[in-house]
Amino acid sequence: MGGHERGQVASALVKETLLASAAGADLTERVLEAHRAVMRAGSGSGESSNMGSTVVCARLSDRACEIVWVGDSRGYLWRRGRLSRLTRDHSYVESLRQGDRISEEQARLHPEANVLTQTLGMGNTIPSRVVLELQAHDWIILCSDGLTSELNDAAIAELLTKSPTPQAASERLLDAALAHGGRDNVSIIVVPSRVSCTAALASGWRRLERSALVWLAALAGAALAVLVVYLAKHFGMLS
């Protein structure tokens, strides 16, 4: 945080901790371990005291994506030309925005926009988590506030629309953030979904088949009920 050397140390600790046993490990617990690592590193006196970092990380497996974050680094979903924010900043202005006290644009320009309510390395951190089902051609965008403080969501979406590949998207976003001032560190990664069109189509058929089976069962039940009533009337079992 803050662009100082201790912020670089904190972010490096976070990265190393997350990647040390990323495969198969609980992502929330790994983020908490990173939090504890930064706290230990900053527990002494001197320049390393009270250092902190934000984080947003994602794990993609099969059709699922899990995102865990602390602070104001963000995760987005780009799907069929539409940008959706998956995370909610742990910040003072975000609490105002969620309470409908200020608009999105007012939040971006607020004089206390950099005041965070949660960080790694400081205080009692509770990571937030979201899980979503991926579709073919989805992109997951992870970024630091160096991007979102320079570009609003509409500007990000416009650049994504013009980008044929994830690599091109990340380069366009980085160039635009720097062109708008680049007043903070800008970190961006655009991750494409590994779900193929064939797999998505097969999943859709499976859902359709399950739905069809439910309807067939309901129709069969109705037909049986009608048949029972008819037979009962035919043989004089009902008055």
Image (cartoon, grey):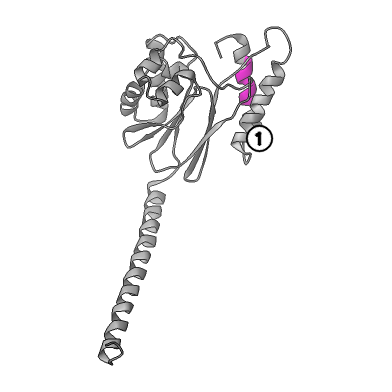
Query: Which residue is situated farthest in the bottom direction here?
Result: 235
Image position, residue 232 (x, y; %): 30, 87
Residue at image location 44% in from the left, 18% down from the top: 93
In this picture, residue 53 sits left or right of residue 213: right
- Quarter containing the N terminus: top right
In the rendered image of this protein, does residue 31 appear above or below residue 225?
A: above
Where does label 1 land, which residue? Answer: 21
In this picture, residue 20 sits left or right of residue 141: right
Image position, residue 228 (x, y; %): 32, 83
Residue at image location 53% in from the left, 29% down from the top: 69
Q: For residue 192, which quarter of the picture?
A: top left
Query: Which residue is situated farthest in the top direction here?
Result: 46
In the rendered image of this protein, does residue 87 appear above or below residue 51?
A: below
Query: Which residue is situated farthest in the front direction here?
Result: 239
Image position, residue 196 (x, y; %): 41, 46
SS assignment at label 1: loop
Residue at image location 42% in from the left, 16% down from the top: 149
Count of numbered badges drawn on the protein: 1
Q: Amino acid at mark 1?
A: Ser
Q: Is residue 135 magenta?
A: no
Magenta residues, start to end: 9-16
In this picture, residue 201 sits left or right of residue 186: left
Image position, residue 178 (x, y; %): 41, 12
Q: Which one is nearer the viewer's eye here, 27 or 19?
A: 27
Q: Is residue 10 magenta?
A: yes
Q: Main secondary structure of the magenta part?
A: helix
In the rendered image of this protein, does residue 98 appear above or below residue 23?
A: above
Q: For residue 121, which quarter of the picture?
A: top right
Q: Residues within 10 Å of mark 1 (few under 14, many from 20)?
A: few
Q: Which one is nearer the viewer's eye here, 179 or 155?
A: 155
- Quarter containing the C terminus: bottom left
